[in-house]
Image (cartoon, rainbow, N blue to C red):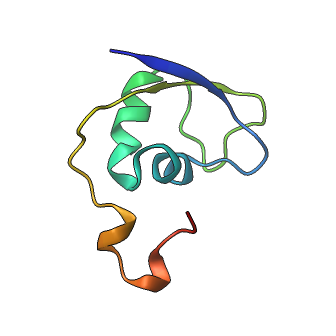
Amino acid sequence: MESFNYTTVEGDRIDRLSAKFYGSNAGIAILADANPAVPLDAVFPMGTVLVVPIVQNMDIETNDNLPPWKQSVK
């Protein structure tokens, strides 16, 4: 499976990174599985390097399916 490395910045959390990379919290398990040695703290320490798998055709909820107040700015 293809992946890339992401270095966390101040305030990064797994739920926010999941939404950023996969469009929803459905990606939390993917990130957790790909980074078993990284503790899933409330907020990642700045500079933590995470492996982010590239997932094709992931069946997750997209912004278009969310009510307007929950959609992130594109």
Q: Give residue 13's position: percent from left, percent from top.
A: 60, 49
On the image, the x and y values in percent for residue 69 come to 48, 84
Task: State the residue in front, 34 or 42.
Answer: 34
Asked if residue 37 shows in the view, the reply is no
The image quadrant that residue 62 belongs to is bottom left
Q: Is residue 17 visible?
A: yes
Depth check: 43 or 49 in front? Answer: 49
Residue at the far top in the pictured view:
1
Q: Is residue 62 above or below residue 46?
A: below
Residue at position x 52%, y 50% from top? 20
Residue 39, given in percent of the width and then of the height, sits at 56, 31
Observer-nearest of 5 and 62:
62
Left or right relative to 73: residue 29: left
Total count of labels: 0
Compared with 16, 5 (above or below) is above
Vertical comparison of 41 with 70: above or below: above
Q: Give the residue at x 76% y 40%.
A: 9
Check the picture and name the quadrant holding the N terminus.
top left
Task: Decide if residue 8 is on the left or right side of residue 40.
Answer: right
Q: Residue at x 34, y 70 (%)?
A: 64
Residue at (24%, 41%) from the top-left corner? Answer: 58
Q: Is residue 66 above or below residue 21?
A: below
Residue 45 position, x and y percent, is 74, 37
